[in-house]
Image: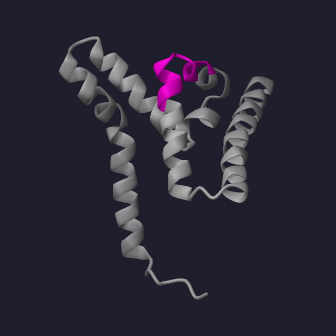
Amino acid sequence: MSDMFLMFIKAFVVGGAICTIAQLLINFTKLTSGKILVFFMLGGLVLQAFGLYKYLVDFAGAGATVPISGFGYLLANGAISGAKHSLYGAFTGGLGAASAGVTAAIVFGYLMSLIFKSRSKKN
Protein backbone atom coordinates (compact mmCIF):
# COMPACT_ATOMS: atom_id res chain seq x y z
CA MET A 1 0.00 0.00 0.00
CA SER A 2 2.76 2.49 0.84
CA ASP A 3 4.55 1.73 -2.45
CA MET A 4 1.44 2.60 -4.40
CA PHE A 5 0.93 5.79 -2.38
CA LEU A 6 4.55 6.80 -3.06
CA MET A 7 4.01 6.14 -6.78
CA PHE A 8 0.98 8.47 -6.75
CA ILE A 9 2.94 11.17 -4.93
CA LYS A 10 5.83 10.98 -7.43
CA ALA A 11 3.42 11.17 -10.38
CA PHE A 12 1.58 14.10 -8.82
CA VAL A 13 4.76 16.05 -8.05
CA VAL A 14 6.39 15.54 -11.47
CA GLY A 15 3.20 16.05 -13.48
CA GLY A 16 2.35 19.06 -11.34
CA ALA A 17 5.81 20.52 -11.86
CA ILE A 18 5.52 20.15 -15.65
CA CYS A 19 2.09 21.81 -15.61
CA THR A 20 3.31 24.55 -13.26
CA ILE A 21 6.15 25.40 -15.63
CA ALA A 22 3.67 25.60 -18.50
CA GLN A 23 1.32 27.83 -16.48
CA LEU A 24 4.19 30.14 -15.53
CA LEU A 25 5.13 30.43 -19.20
CA ILE A 26 1.53 31.32 -20.06
CA ASN A 27 1.29 33.91 -17.27
CA PHE A 28 4.67 35.61 -17.57
CA THR A 29 5.59 35.42 -21.27
CA LYS A 30 3.88 36.42 -24.46
CA LEU A 31 4.06 32.85 -25.78
CA THR A 32 0.76 31.45 -26.94
CA SER A 33 -0.57 28.19 -25.55
CA GLY A 34 0.05 26.50 -28.90
CA LYS A 35 3.70 27.47 -28.94
CA ILE A 36 4.16 26.27 -25.37
CA LEU A 37 2.50 22.98 -26.31
CA VAL A 38 4.92 22.51 -29.21
CA PHE A 39 7.93 23.45 -27.05
CA PHE A 40 6.97 20.90 -24.41
CA MET A 41 6.38 18.18 -27.00
CA LEU A 42 9.73 18.92 -28.64
CA GLY A 43 11.35 19.07 -25.19
CA GLY A 44 10.18 15.54 -24.43
CA LEU A 45 11.37 14.40 -27.84
CA VAL A 46 14.83 15.97 -27.47
CA LEU A 47 15.27 14.73 -23.90
CA GLN A 48 14.44 11.19 -25.00
CA ALA A 49 16.73 11.50 -28.02
CA PHE A 50 19.55 12.01 -25.51
CA GLY A 51 18.17 9.23 -23.30
CA LEU A 52 17.20 11.51 -20.39
CA TYR A 53 13.39 11.46 -20.36
CA LYS A 54 13.38 7.72 -19.71
CA TYR A 55 14.76 8.38 -16.21
CA LEU A 56 11.86 10.74 -15.50
CA VAL A 57 9.36 8.15 -16.78
CA ASP A 58 10.96 5.44 -14.63
CA PHE A 59 10.73 7.72 -11.59
CA ALA A 60 7.29 9.29 -12.03
CA GLY A 61 5.40 6.96 -14.39
CA ALA A 62 2.17 8.63 -15.53
CA GLY A 63 3.33 11.96 -14.09
CA ALA A 64 5.85 12.10 -16.93
CA THR A 65 3.96 10.28 -19.69
CA VAL A 66 0.55 11.97 -19.47
CA PRO A 67 1.64 15.60 -20.13
CA ILE A 68 2.36 16.58 -23.74
CA SER A 69 6.10 16.13 -23.17
CA GLY A 70 5.29 12.44 -22.75
CA PHE A 71 3.94 12.43 -26.31
CA GLY A 72 7.31 13.70 -27.56
CA TYR A 73 8.97 10.97 -25.50
CA LEU A 74 6.71 8.38 -27.10
CA LEU A 75 7.46 9.61 -30.64
CA ALA A 76 11.21 9.60 -30.03
CA ASN A 77 11.12 6.19 -28.38
CA GLY A 78 9.20 4.72 -31.35
CA ALA A 79 11.55 6.31 -33.88
CA ILE A 80 14.62 5.04 -32.02
CA SER A 81 13.29 1.49 -31.81
CA GLY A 82 12.17 1.62 -35.45
CA ALA A 83 15.61 2.85 -36.55
CA LYS A 84 17.13 -0.34 -35.18
CA HIS A 85 15.33 -2.24 -37.95
CA SER A 86 15.61 0.11 -40.93
CA LEU A 87 15.69 3.71 -42.09
CA TYR A 88 12.03 3.39 -43.00
CA GLY A 89 11.37 2.20 -39.44
CA ALA A 90 12.92 5.39 -38.11
CA PHE A 91 10.23 7.39 -39.89
CA THR A 92 7.30 5.09 -39.16
CA GLY A 93 8.29 3.95 -35.65
CA GLY A 94 7.14 7.13 -33.93
CA LEU A 95 3.81 7.08 -35.74
CA GLY A 96 3.27 3.44 -34.87
CA ALA A 97 4.10 4.03 -31.22
CA ALA A 98 1.70 6.97 -30.94
CA SER A 99 -1.09 5.62 -33.13
CA ALA A 100 -3.23 4.27 -30.27
CA GLY A 101 -3.22 7.60 -28.42
CA VAL A 102 -3.95 9.63 -31.53
CA THR A 103 -6.75 7.27 -32.52
CA ALA A 104 -8.29 7.46 -29.04
CA ALA A 105 -8.15 11.28 -29.14
CA ILE A 106 -9.91 11.37 -32.51
CA VAL A 107 -12.58 8.81 -31.56
CA PHE A 108 -13.37 10.39 -28.18
CA GLY A 109 -13.31 13.88 -29.69
CA TYR A 110 -15.83 12.75 -32.29
CA LEU A 111 -18.04 11.11 -29.65
CA MET A 112 -18.01 14.27 -27.55
CA SER A 113 -18.97 16.32 -30.61
CA LEU A 114 -22.02 14.10 -31.01
CA ILE A 115 -23.01 14.44 -27.36
CA PHE A 116 -22.38 18.16 -26.77
CA LYS A 117 -23.35 21.18 -28.84
CA SER A 118 -20.54 23.61 -29.52
CA ARG A 119 -21.08 27.31 -29.03
CA SER A 120 -18.88 30.36 -28.98
CA LYS A 121 -17.80 32.04 -25.78
CA LYS A 122 -19.60 35.19 -24.75
CA ASN A 123 -17.14 37.90 -23.80
**Between residues 121 and 113, which one lies in front from this camera angle?**
121
Q: Is residue 68 above or below residue 97?
A: below
User: Does residue 25 belong to the magenta stretch?
Assistant: no
Q: Quadrant of the N terminus?
A: top right
Residue at 44% from the left image edge and 31% from the top image edge? 74
Residue at 58% from the left image edge and 88% from the top image edge? 122
Total numbered badges shown on the rendered structure: 0
**Could you tell whether 17 is left or right of 62 in the image?**
right
**Between residues 76 and 24, which one lies in front from this camera angle?**
24
Q: Residue furthest bottom?
A: 122
**Could you tell whether 116 is left or right of 88 in the image?**
right
Residue at 77% from the left image edge and 31% from the top image edge? 5
| Residue 45 drawn at (x, y percent) | 47, 30
Q: Is residue 89 above or below residue 28?
A: above
Q: Range of the magenta residues?
A: 45-55
Specify the quadrant of the image occupied by residue 12: top right
**Could you tell whether 115 is left or right of 30 in the image?**
left
| Residue 13 drawn at (x, y percent) | 76, 36
> Which scheme is used to colour this image of the protein?
one colour
Q: Quadrant of the C terminus?
A: bottom right
